[in-house]
Image (tube, helix red, strand yellow):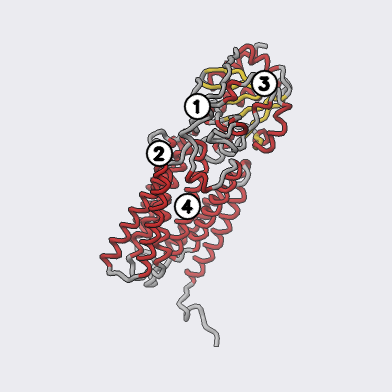
Amino acid sequence: METTLQELGITAGDVILEISYLVSAILFVIGLKLMSHPESAKKGNLWAAVGMGLAMVTTLFLHRGVSGQTISLINGIVIVSAIIFGGIIGTVIARRIKMTAMPQLVSFFNATGGAASALVALMEYSNPDNSSAMVTLLGLIIGAIAFSGSMIAYGKLDGKVGDIFAKWTTYFNIFMLVLITALTVYMLAFDHDMATQTMLSYVLLGLALIYGIMFVMPIGGADMPVVISLLNSLTGIAAAMAGFIYSNQAMILGGIFVGSAGAILTLLMCKAMNRSLLNVIIGAFGGGGAAADKDQGTIKEISLSDASVLLSYSQKVVIVPGYGLAVAQAQYATNDLVKLLEDKGVEVKFAIHPVAGRMPGHMNVLLAEADVPYTKLVEMDDINPDMPNTDVTIVVGANDVVNPAALDDPSSPIYGMPIINAHESKNIIVMKRGMGKGYAGIENFLFFNDKTRMLFGNAKDSIQALVNEIKQL
């Protein structure tokens, strides 16, 4: 005897809702695929946004709770109001944010996602209809860690929070992990009254928040891009946990996509830095430096006129961008320089290090803003074999990613990290404001290389002056 959908309690709205989730998942996959290449990334973002919008609209009108009722009018008004309010704030922030502050914005967005997931878990843990206490507690823990950790990352990137380099932080974090695990097991293994459940959930929330803070505090320097991608992964996992709580396939799939993408990116960046994820977490860069007794050599400067002649009569030029280029907003001037040199028959490429800047892909986004062709952006592994044949390498605001100490100084905190081999090129021009150290806080002996000439000053002003000099040749 056949059973109808109505007899199973399944309505047409339920079927449409599930189909919409499937379509949303397909749109997410298409979006992620398109985001894998800079030329199609903008379109991919749009596809993924349409998928998320579809899931939100169908959930708002068709989702039924445990009681079988759809979302009430009052709750619907609250939800729509929150979406509109959040959308307006997000739009204003996105339009006003500078490219130099993009890493901070990414960290802040990670924090809001983690906070939302943690709040969902906190509210639903004491709900009698909640059938998955373990998933709820995991969502609470991961969401809280993602929130507090991302806020600390935001503060560190914005220069508002310093680093803590001390051995006790490692032992403290291990202790906190054991404490969080033990409390979680205790909460799952034993029945408690409502008041005790609520109290324990708040204690667990507090412990997770503290761990998130102390997890990120010791991490500094060149490890920050890895930490940002790791926190992004945690935010996705927390969102997936929230999806399991509500049995919402769109949230589950979206969270899985974000979590897995963040995890893959984190591992790829660790591989690019020749470091394990555990080493990043407990052995952060910074707080040290290359051997203090090493002979530094002599700094040699170059004039604008000499630099313009050297570049104009070169055949191959490689530009290594770094965070200093972003701070100076020199991407447009740099593109003008590239066009001018190409008009003179010079081949110009950009060497992109995986962890250049303060977040994954920071330099790619920055240069794309100035309409630099994507074909000119060459990854580290592809550009390094050609560096000995490069006439001039221009280092614009980069530091740690071209530091030869990573190759030949075992006492350096960045020893073993692959770098762009700028030191192998025939001539090197380094553009910096002064002799300040990079984000890892260590000396860069590339500056003292016999082939290196320093061009001090604001990168944007220096490049614009260089463009004017070349035009006069």
Amino acid of disc 4: Leu
Residue occupied by mark 3: 427
Secondary structure under tag 2 reads loop
Q: Earlier in the sequence, mark 2 or mark 1?
A: 2
Is 115 situated left or right of 379 in this image? left
Report if the CB atoms under discs 1 and 3 are less than 8 Å apart. no
Amino acid of disc 1: Lys
Q: Earlier in the sequence, mark 1 or mark 3?
A: 3
Distance between the alpha carbons at the discs numbered 2 and 4: 22 Å
Distance between the alpha carbons at the discs numbered 1 and 3: 22 Å
Distance between the alpha carbons at the discs numbered 3 and 4: 44 Å
Q: Residue at x 38, y 60 (%)?
A: 121
Amino acid of disc 3: Asn
Using the image as rendered, state which of residue 300 and residue 244 is in the foreground.
Answer: 300
Residue occupied by mark 2: 164
Q: Residues within 10 Å of mark 3 (few under 14, many from 20)?
A: many
Q: Which mark is residue 234?
A: 4
Percent x, y for residue 29?
59, 55
**Quadrant of the frame with the N terminus:** bottom right
Q: Residues within 10 Å of mark 2 (few under 14, many from 20)?
A: some
Amino acid of disc 2: Ile
